[in-house]
Image: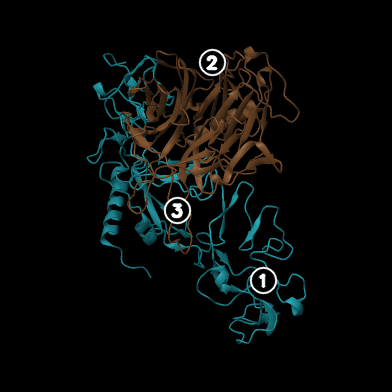
Amino acid sequence: MRAAPQPLIVSLLALSLVSMVGIASCSRVQRSLGESLLDPGVGIVPSGDAGPPPGPDAEAPRELCKASDCPAPYTTCSSDTFRCETNSDSDNDNCGACGVKCPHGDEIRDFFGAEWSCQSGECRMTCDPRSLKADCNQNPADGCETDLGCDPTSCGACGVRCPDGLACREGNCGCPGGLTDCGGNTCRLAEDCVSLVADDNNCGACGIACPSEPAPPYPNTRLGCMHSECGQVKCEFGFDDCNQDIETDGCESDVFNDPQNCGMCKKKCAPGQFCLAGKCKCAPNETACSMGEGIVQCADLDSDPYNCGACGLACPMPTEGLGIEACRLGHCTIDCPSGYADCDGRVENGCETMVSADPRNCGACNVECDLAVEQPCVNGACLLEPCTGGGTQ
Amino acid sequence: MSSTNGKRRSRTPSGLLVATVAIAATQLWCASEEAVSPPEDGGSSSGPDAVSDAAAPDGETSSPACSDSFCRVSFPGMEAVSLDAVWARSASEVWLVGSTGFAARFDGATWRRIETGTKAALHGVAGTEDGTVWGAGSTQELLQLNRETGGKATAVDAGFKAMLDDLSAFGSEIYAVGTTIKTYEYPPPETPPMPDNIWRYGPSGDGGQPSWRPVSPPCPMGEYEPECQKLRAVWVESSERQWFAGDEGKIFRTDASSDADAGAPGRLRLVEMSSSSLRRLNGLWGFRGDDIWAVGDQGAIRHWDGEAWSVVASPAVANLHGVWGARSDDVWAVGEDGAVIHWDGTSWTVIDIPFSGEHRPLLRAVAGAGDDVWIAGEGVLLRSRRVTGGDR
């Protein structure tokens, strides 16, 4: 049962719905940007020039002039730092027009199983890909209301009905072969589908639990359900009787950690690998890093920000602003979201520069637009337009 | 003595890396007479166990194999590697190290891969006068590249855990800068190890066996624990004087004056110098004690003339990572976006490289012997075309 929506959520949703209707009719103007703009990325100014570097339009085709007016869908909203900063086609906080917010974020996603994002100037709903929720009734007002993992009338997909007597388990009708549905209500295969042959709580039939009995005198064994009968000697979880001699040495193989029997008997790990939780580690591109206390972790020293270039070398993380620490080819760096860059080289403040709109760092750090004519930086490029006579080339 | 400078900043978009790697990969199988030497050099052969090095034939990719000044050199295994440092004892002994445990040696004709037995990054390389060549990443990978043990470069236990970002040698000594790697133990030790940022390899003061040991002054207390200034480059002028550069435009040199405070035993005394820069300095190289260059982020270039550090007009706006010179009037600096600039004694000028547009790679280090100049970067190795063949 859902809790009542928070007032904030309701208002955001209402606003988004208004925006869907009201903004959808906004006309779009074909942009005159892009193909004629030059690559600003070489980062070098002409020799002997100690002054500021030229903008990316320094060698622009002659038929293009510097422009100053924002081209649609770019606009300048009151919260913007730079001119033409907002792309009203895709800005979730200014979708179609300044101030029109698309409901999004963790709270919205948790409640509706969906969130709204700005696409072509309209707030459009998408279901949370991390869940099995879907909008089967095609009504965005209740978000993605259907749980495809549990709903027997929409199991795995909208409208897929399970046969009578079969429940929906993780998007599938009924349990996989060999397992029995004992009527749990989690909708999860691992919890609701049991083996009546070996499940201590459902031994031979649903609900038949084996009694607790003293452990047998063999290492790593206990009494429980085997072959649908209680009181049978079986291995403790994580161990196996690989030598088939349980009365001599019990379940002698630690299949969680034994590289000769990793995960199951006779499954050998490759040379240089070790066995962790029943899986052979590390991958060929990884290094086994000792983390102390006997803990070993596999790390790709080329790309692991917690083991960058060497085991244990953690990359510093930004303490404010955008961006996350990253490791590239053994060097610590910051991964910046699209449109931002770390121009000052300081990790602490993250990706502090909006290279998508900053005319002093347009498209890349230190690439300046013509500030004298207020040439804006639009989508990472100094704005140009076809010359109409009198323009600044 | 030359110094190499492997640095850690990188902001090249991943797409650029992929493109660079793709370009490099296309060069890999393009064997040519230029494989071993620049075109003017006449070419030579590669041994059967040698890695092949080849320049791309013109017209096969969007970038030519050579520019007026440099040719690309490729060999298997370098495409997905950040080549972080290069060091040359002579034109016939050049060493190259990088990420994923990469190490290779050029003997004047052929590059040969060195088996290191590690996948850790090697950020610095330098040699001492006894012939030993050190490659360093973390101190778990402190390697004598030309000493073999069990088919691999000999690993040396330094006795401490640190990531070494740059090495510089003078005589029998090597200085390294980097960062102490924190270790987490439970329960935590009563006296946790103090962090350091400078280490030295060499004979001890009493004539004992050479060893690695930390020599940085005690690092100042931060908010919760001692925090060291991040140093990224070192150049050793002499046994008595060493130079260091790093974040926030910091430059230090050892205080060799007799009237200085004694300082902590076995530790350097450092004097901070005004660099007139708050930008990170990534590379340091000197010709003499009155002719030293520092380069850094956003094209920053500073020069020491024996009296003061001065700002030098830079033709680059990209971050510069490495600097090296053959003479006072023949200095090279390299950096991001394929930045290669040259000092001719009067001014710095941009030098063209055989990469264009978005394929321009991140270059991390430059070194060489005389006119034989090598530039290393992410998936790329360049060699100058104006080789004279002589060591300088």
Neighbourhood count class around disc 2 (C-alpha, 10 Å): few under 14, some 14–19, many 20 upward: some
Nearer the camera: disc 2 or disc 3:
3
Q: Which mark is residue A239?
A: 1
Quadrant of the image containing the N terminus of chain A: bottom left
Q: Name the residue that disc number 3 marks.
A: B193
Return the mark for residue B170.
Answer: none
Label 2–label 3 contact, CB within 8 A: no
Chain painted cyan: A
Q: CA distance from mark 2 to mark 1?
A: 65 Å
Whole-percent x, y for residue A120 in the image: 37, 40
Q: Position of residue A328 (x, y in %)?
A: 50, 40
Amino acid found under the numbered disc labelled 2: Ser
How far across and down, in percent of the image, does residue B36 sit? Answer: 66, 21
Left/right of residue A371 with respect to residue B133 in the rendered view: left
Marks 3 and 1 share the same chain:
no
In terms of depth relative to the viewer, which is nearer, B371 or B55?
Answer: B371
Residues tagged 3 and 1 counted as in contact (Cβ below 8 A): no
Q: Could you tell whether A78 is left or right of A368 in the image?
A: left
In the rendered view, would you say B62 is above or below A155? Answer: above
Nearer the N terminus, badge 2 or badge 3? 2
Task: Specify the amino acid type for callout 3.
Answer: Pro
Q: Quadrant of residue A41?
A: top left
Element type at mark 1:
strand
**Are discs 2 and 1 less than 8 Å apart at CB?**
no
Q: Nearer the viewer, residue A266 or A203?
A: A266
User: Is residue A36 at least partly visible in the picture?
Assistant: no
The x, y position of residue A54, in whole percent, is 35, 20
Q: Secondary structure at mark 3?
A: loop
- Which element type, helix, strand or loop, lies under badge 2? loop
Q: Which residue is mark 2?
A: B69
Q: Where is B114 relative to A92, above or below?
A: above
Q: State the brown chain.
A: B
